[in-house]
Amino acid sequence: MAELTIPSASLSNERQPDQVDFGRTLFVVLATVLLGFGLTMAHSASVTSWPTESERIYLARQLVFVAVGLAAAGVCASVSSEMWQKLAPILFWGTIALLILVMIPGFGVKVKGAQRWLRVAGLTLQPSELAKITLPIYLASRLVQLRASKVPWWRILGSLMIPAGLLICLVLIQPDLGTAIFLSAGTMLVLWIGGAPFKTFGLLAATAIPALGCMLVFKPYQIRRVTGFFETWADWTTAPYQLRQSLVTLGSGGWTGVGLGKGWQKLSFLPEANTDFVFAVVGEELGLVATLGLMLVWSGLFLAGLRILSTRDYRSFAFIVGFTLLAQLLGQAMLNIAVVTAMVPPKGISHPLVSCGGSNLVVSLVMLGIVYGISKPTDRHFVSSP
């Protein structure tokens, strides 16, 4: 049965310790740059048109989330890949329990028609964000175990798709179609890196696409998002307000922007200026140079992450989890940029490490901590050069 193979030249484990150390340093530096830039934009995008305490409140709250996220990332960075494998079932079924708890009146919090949050002791938690971590860890753990036992692929798929389908369905009924699609893509990524045959993806696509179509039929507002996206490029005057303001905000910045904190569109013109559309504020205040620079830093972080993961075999649990988490972070950042620039239909999705918010920021930092931790090299992971 044919399997997908990754060229050894690009993902070789023949790395010297000094090369890996450089990659780890670069990884931390780039993550720090993104986090610092995010704090700056969280403050700038929250500045109001008259003197109030709101901008200080946003910045102080974001600093609290950063502190929590860094502490959690530090703990996760100290956990070995073997321990993550042991914890995988507990983490996964714990996430399932939280997703069920969200749907129970009195526990879940409904905002704008969606019940996606739990509020405990004044803190808000979004379990679907945790699923971006726990689902890949669980699937990779099961995949590695089943492959080691020489289980045929059709049985592996059954063992993986049933729990993954349960979690994704719980996210769908919140409703949160965007996150459900994101989790489905992460599942496909685990299978791809894990060596699933190509025909597996054709079979899964054949069942997923009709199911997605049925969901869209019963969600008129999702259809309006798609039609509004096409209207943006066909007739500017009929385009959705969010997309119009987003493009106006981006375009008004020019090459170098109007200056940090001096943007006008965030003053009640651009919706969700400090969360979903913070990238547009970056374009207005710091210009095209900053938006391209932000994309370059994300690309560098991804490549640095691959470099430090190269000490691991590319079919191992550590590599599958690390690659999937990195790809999810980069994919979310690029999807956010695509939404802001009207390249895809509008969807509420935050920019990792840059948008204001608690759950997504903490989860993003935890992802980076896990990647850093499971990539820690040991002597047996290096192959001596001839």
Image (spheres, grey):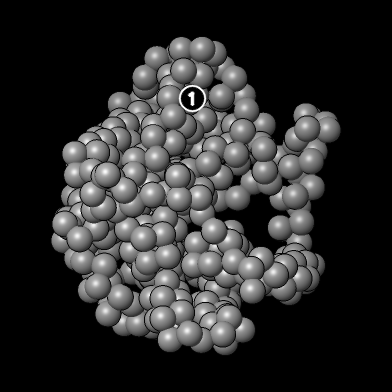
* Helix, strand or loop under label 1: helix
Nearest to the observer: residue 333 or residue 297: 297
Q: Is residue 250 above or below residue 184?
A: above
In the shown orientation, is residue 247 left or right of residue 271?
Answer: right
Residue placed under numbered mark 1 in the picture: 292
In the shown orientation, is residue 113 left or right of residue 214?
Answer: left
Where on the picture, by quarter, is residue 123? bottom left
Nearest to the observer: residue 168 or residue 283: 168
Residue 102, given in percent of the width and then of the height, sits at 44, 76
Outermost residue to the right = 234
In the shown orientation, is residue 230 left or right of residue 194?
Answer: right
Residue 196 visible, this orientation: yes
Residue displayed at 19% across by 39% down: 18
Residue 68 visible, this orientation: no
Residue 262, given in percent of the width and then of the height, sits at 40, 18
Residue 141, given in percent of the width and then of the height, sits at 38, 76
Amino acid under disc 1: Leu
Q: Quadrant of the C terminus?
A: top left
Residue 142, given in percent of the width and then of the height, sits at 42, 80
In the shown orientation, is residue 124 left or right of residue 153?
Answer: left
Residue displayed at 41% across by 76% down: 144
Residue displayed at 40% across by 14% down: 259
